[in-house]
Image (cartoon, rainbow, N blue to C red):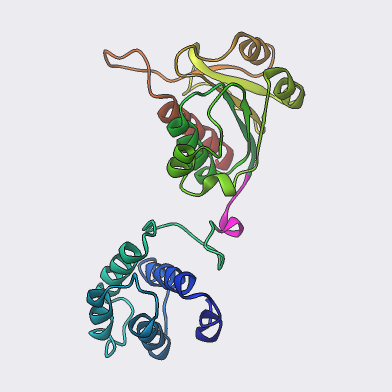
Amino acid sequence: MITLKKLDTLKSDTRMRKVVRILESMGRGELFEGEYLKGLLERIIQTDEQRVTQETRERSARLLDVSSCDDRRFQDLAYALASDMGANFGDWDFYDENEVLDRSVRTEFPISLLLDKIRSPFNVGSMFRTAESFGVSNIYLTKPGAAPDHPRTLRSAAGATSVVPYTSGESEEILQLVKDRPVFALEVGGEDIRSFDFPSNGVMVVGSEELGVSPEMLSLARSSAGIVSIGLYGAKGSLNVSTACAIALHEWVSRLRA
């Protein structure tokens, strides 16, 4: 927990964003002493950060006499302050003192994700976020495809591109990096995900939205760990690629943990 003295060394906008995270942590059960709470509230009330509205300052003032941090009004205050500052309000995100996702809280597994010519920045960002959540150690991206630093990728990744290491390159370059590891592809026509033998470490290939996994990556997967498929029961013949990726990663990590 950052001290009030340390908090005062931060720039006013960074200080208020940090206060948002501290208030959020109360909703996860972290406990704070009355004087510390009062100090946080006073800093909101007295801040020279002009984006903090009078309504938020008044909301803080009404909490000065509250000694219990489990009062739900603190969460209302966190949301109000986050809105003032234009911050993303992530109830269960963990941030370090530099306001980036905290790598130290991650559980990482010896698994990698290979995004094979994924064209949509939204899908790339979404899969970065999913990969971060399921402890993927690194991501490979084959070109052409949406860049990890594309504005829409960054928006849907919600900070995950700064946490999960990634390597971008032409297919031939990426093939050389993964060819000595167990590689399997997420694609139609493979073994059902419920019976698939997931490797204890390895690389999962996810193909482009229109064409699926490229022939060279499919060939590698067939000669290595195989093809895995998700059973579908509706009129649609496929899932969104980021949704399918999330299902497969959840299943893979669940097996590893078991």
Q: How far from the left and from the top, in percent, is residue 45?
A: 33, 83
Image vertical order of residue 238 relative to residue 155, above or below = above
With 143 as the anchor, is 37 left or right in this view?
left
Q: Is residue 41 magenta?
A: no
With 185 as the anchor, is 77 left or right in this view?
left
Q: How far from the left and from the top, in percent, is residue 193?
A: 48, 22
- Hey, which quadrant is residue 152 in on the image? top left
Q: Nearer the viewer, residue 120 or 181?
A: 120
Instruction: Quarter of the image for the C terminus: give it.
Output: top right
With 252 as the anchor, is 50 left or right in this view?
left
Q: Nearer the viewer, residue 141 or 224?
A: 141
Seen at 46% across and 75% down, the residue is: 12
Image vertical order of residue 230 relative to residue 15, above or below = above
Seen at 65% across and 33% down, the residue is: 200
Q: How far from the left and from the top, in percent, is residue 237?
A: 35, 12
The stretch of residues the image draws in magenta is 102-108
Q: How far from the left and from the top, in percent, is residue 166?
A: 64, 38
Seen at 31% across and 83% down, the residue is: 68
Q: Nearer the viewer, residue 30 or 256?
A: 30
Q: Nearer the viewer, residue 120 or 240?
A: 120
Q: How many marks?
A: 0
